[in-house]
Amino acid sequence: MAKAEIYDEKSIQVLEGLEAVRMRPGMYIGSTSRKGLNHLIYEIVDNAVDEHLAGCCDHIDVCLEKDGSCTVTDNGRGIPVGMHEKGVPAERLVYTTLHAGGKFDNTVYKTSGGLHGVGSSVVNALSEYLDVKVKRDGAIHHDRYVRGKPDIELVGGLLPIMGRTKETGTTVNFLPDPEIFEVTRFSATEVKSRLHETAYLNPGLTICFTDRREDPEETVTYHEPDGIRGYVKEMNKACEAVTDVIYFEGSDENIKVEAALQYVNEFHENVLGYCNNIFNADGGTHLTGFKTAFTQVMNVYARELGILKEKDQNFTGSDIRNGMTAVISVKHPAPRFEGQTKTKLDNPDAARVVAKVVSEEAPHFFDRNLDMLKAVLSCAERSAKIRKTEERTKTNLLTKQKYSFDSNGKLANCISRDAKKCEIFIVEGDSAGGSAKTARDRNYQAILPIRGKILNVEKASIDKVLANAEIKTMINAFGCGFSEGYGNNFDIAKLRYDKIIIMADADVDGAHIGTLLLTLFYRYMPDLIREGHIYIAMPPLYKVVPSKGQGEYLYDDKALEKYRKNHPDQKFTLQRYKGLGEMDPDQLWETTLNPATRMLRRIEIGDPRLSSDVTGVLMGTDVPPRREFIYKHAREAELDV
Ligand code: 0R9
């Protein structure tokens, strides 16, 4: 039968809706990259989870098939297949209409965070084919679509029956359309991670994942009866726990609230918010409600126990949450999300109800668990102490900065105040510093000698960092302050030098000093790196002076080898520089300071993921990887003329 006969006039309108999804897929699933592709699976799984939330399904299978398709099966009631008032089976309406959630079904809490119940039809529109089998009313009902259009003829207005069964449930098998997606291979790692998260958020559910693309095929079962308590425990598994996992639950105004939290011996907080099983990356009202109420409850306890005296100010929210890992999960009948990305919960009633549950349940718990109460409050006390020290150190530093430009008198500044022309050399060692002071062009070159290895800022608290004489001098000299967790006092517009040049020996110790300086800049003045103001001077290793002709500087052993090859018959004297300290002022000028002849490398860190790895490399105890890092990530050597 010709396809046209499958549609009636009403369904034409419907298909135009799905055509819109195919025209602008990004609007419905975010992107057509791997992320969008995996999202198709989540949309179908979320429908099965809705059936679980309705209390009718406890098992979901997700299978990545050999042919690139995905099959999701649930053991719920089965999608209704009876004739809808619109004249088609309800199932067909679900897969072909961009309907609003709640119109056809009566589940209370919809999981669909962004798609508002249109998930099934969007997946259908973006699939080369989608096949549905519904076990219900003693039969297996079958439907199939090709690029969103029905591909099976109805029998007396109903779905054809392909067999008999006593079971109930829904199976959906779909193949993403390569005309739509840039990539069509699902990422097993990402899918598994999302399924595990779903299992934590739904403790009564078992999710079975199979990857048939692998040989042998991979099967994992996710069942997390401890729910979000287990989730918090899992996140903290590599940390030293300070409390057990603490759990509250309650409900009001038709909103269900669950909170699980645990303190670990770490200096940061990690509080995650979920609404109807959807992660809210930007938090929202549920987290605001939790934070406000928890801070208030803890401050009341701190006063009752005399930890805070009358004259003391309350602990701040971050004092109290320092070291906390928490998951706050709400189930809301009509969630609203803020902004373009829909990743922030917006319902004011969620804040109210979460705050109410926490204000009632937290005292209930802590009244009976004084040890844990004391542990939480001692974390808060410790955090408040550190915060106050940091605030004091910062004020001291900022006030000092006004009076003293060079706190220990080492900086030999330049005459010019035109930052665009000025350079500052951070020079390792007093002797090289002395030579550099003589050799420089004092109009625009400043020299700051530093003694040996500066403090490793990765391993020191901020008060130690800011009390360090060398670091203080550098911050003062650069003139733009520093940025750090609690606030940003850094202003690149105030930078006094266009180029900050690290000048250290070309040996392992020099590389280590360079690394320590880069760590300082990366952690406390990252904009200096981002905006390309940090350089490493590349002093030569050798000078060859032929019996006739001009001398030449060579920067490494390879260059020397090449020189020897290219001048086989030449007699020359070879001078090897052990360190900057061995060069006389003229040599230092020519090799390292003179913009016409020197070699500089600019430091660039482009990939933010690389940047976080950087710290690991820089913090490590091994010198070679650090040295390698500096030279690998410095831009290709360029003659700075
Ligand atoms: C494998 C993925 N599973 C699903 O997509 C799925 C949807 C679905 C469902 C219902 C039951 N199971 C499901 N699995 C359902 C049944 C009933 C009422 N509401 C929902 C019922 O039996 O009364 N539905 C989701 C939407 C719809 N059904 C509806 F719109 F067709 F009603």
Image: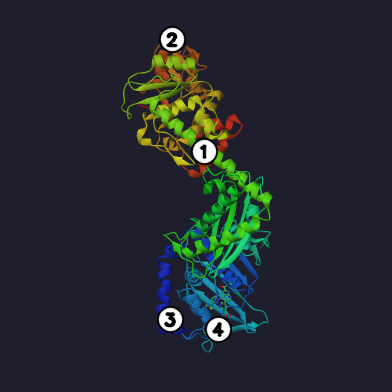
Label 1 – label 4 distance at C-alpha: 70 Å
Image point 62% across, 65% down: which residue? 202
Label 2 – label 4 distance at C-alpha: 97 Å
Q: Tell me the residue that label 2 is attached to.
A: 547
Ligand 1 sits in quadrant: bottom right
Mark closest to the chain's N terminus, 3 or 1: 3
How many residues crowd mark 1 within 10 Å: few (<14), some (14–19), many (20+)? few
Label 2 – label 3 distance at C-alpha: 93 Å
Q: Secondary structure at mark 1?
A: helix
Mark closest to the chain's N terminus, 1 or 4: 4
User: Depth-wise, is mark 1 or mark 2 nearer the camera?
Assistant: 1
Q: Position of residue 420 (x, y in %)?
A: 32, 30
Residue at the far bottom: name it.
156
- Drawn side of residue 478 relative to residue 512, left or right: left
Q: Tell me the residue that label 4 is attached to.
A: 159
How many residues crowd mark 2 within 10 Å: few (<14), some (14–19), many (20+)? few
Amino acid type at circle 1 is Lys
Label 3 – label 4 distance at C-alpha: 16 Å
Mark closest to the chain's N terminus, 2 or 3: 3
Q: Tell me the residue that label 3 is attached to.
A: 11
